[in-house]
Image (tube, rainbow, N blue to C red):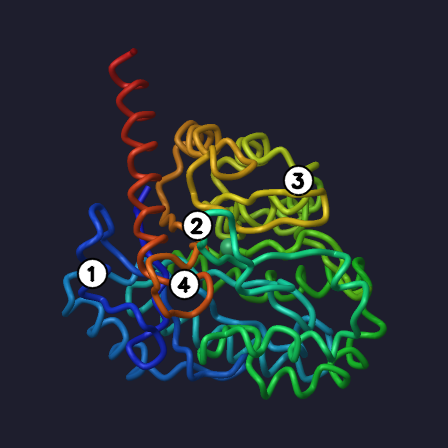
Amino acid sequence: MEMTLRWYGSKHDSVTLKQIRQIPGVKGVITTLYDTMPGEVWEEADIKAMIDEVEAAGLKVAGIESVNIHDAIKIGSPDREQYIDNYITTLERLGKAGIHMVCYNFMPVFDWTRTELARVRPDGSTVLAYTQEAVDKIKPEEMFNSIGSDMNGFVMPGWEPERMARVKELFEMYKDVDDEKLFENLKYFLERIMPVCDKYDINMAIHPDDPAWSVFGLPRIIINKENILRMMKMVDNPHNGVTFCSGSYGTNLENDLPDMIRSLKGRIHFAHVRNLKFNSPTDFEEAAHLSSDGTFDMYEIMKALYEIGFDGPIRPDHGRMIWDEVAMPGYGLYDRALGATYLNGLWEAIEKSQTRGL
Ligand SMILES: [Mn+2]
């Protein structure tokens, strides 16, 4: 595996490449062109500038998170052809620039959903949290207002104010899209992009829906082992793969994370590894990465990744806000650096115990 950190670019991120370079074992970043909109073709000059900046800091671009999918593709409207063509052009340019992993998601309307961005934990740190009770009480269009003020002045991906202003309109556009239709549209998209992925060896890594169940009645398909295996089978190409995000699949306690990892051998192209602490099956908060701080056995998760021969980029995921850092919620430096170090430690121990037969 290749340890990385997500980076939002010098214009948007409070964390610098220099700081990332100094986290032991972190050799690359996962980034994107944050000023492009879903559906736009990425300019070659912008891709090159992004890579040059990262490499000048002694790091590499280990993959893109994300090249976002235009709503027309998810809805399956006639104008999707143009947006898929644009997506293919972007992939071609990324492939030519030496980038071989692209994360994306297929969630309608909302990207990830949380009800609090700064829940205080017993140790005084603050974390992102979700409670179904709070979601049940509000209308979708109120979602943005309820969390917008908690963003520490940052704009969070998927929660751009321009997008949130259109929430009602977006719901209307998705009204005829159910789970089956969404699967169908995803299949259509994947079949169209696989030739360019084959040509440039680009691993597509779909990110799970978060939380892994329907929110506000919207369809959600990338939520469990059954659905993800269906997706792998429906476009049976090794470039059609997944981002294994423990924190997203883990929102549903029925998901057996190490078992899911083993069943996806060869198709996990990117891993997000973090822990959650459950207070009830529908109320969870993002804990420190350490197993004992949350609900998941992080050793078992890393061991499963080791056993399937996972060799792609991996990153710690959302961190707690600690040590008075002011940053985008979930994306401060300190707790993610602790996470990276912990995951590297687990990996070293697993690797040595296996290879030395201890
Ligand atoms: Mn994730």
Q: Nearer the viewer, mark 4 or mark 1?
A: 4
Tell me the SS state at disc 3.
Answer: helix
Q: CA distance from mark 4 to mark 1?
A: 19 Å
Disc 3: which residue = 225
Quarter occupied by residue 303: top left
Q: Which kind of residue does numbered mark 4 sit on? A: Tyr
Residue 87 place in picture, x, y as percent: 51, 75
Query: Which residue does the image show at 44% across and 64% down from the upper left?
Result: 65
Q: Quadrant of the C terminus?
A: top left
Label 3 vs 4, first from the N-terminus = 3
Whether residue 113 is visible to the viewer of this picture, yes or no, is no
Disc 2: which residue = 270
| In contact (CB < 8 Å): disc 1 and disc 3 | no
Q: CA distance from mark 1 to mark 3?
A: 34 Å
Q: Which kind of residue does numbered mark 3 sit on? A: Lys
Disc 1: which residue = 59
In this image, 58 relative to 338: left or right? left
- Which residue is more in the foreground, 315 or 320? 320
Q: Nearer the viewer, mark 2 or mark 4?
A: 4
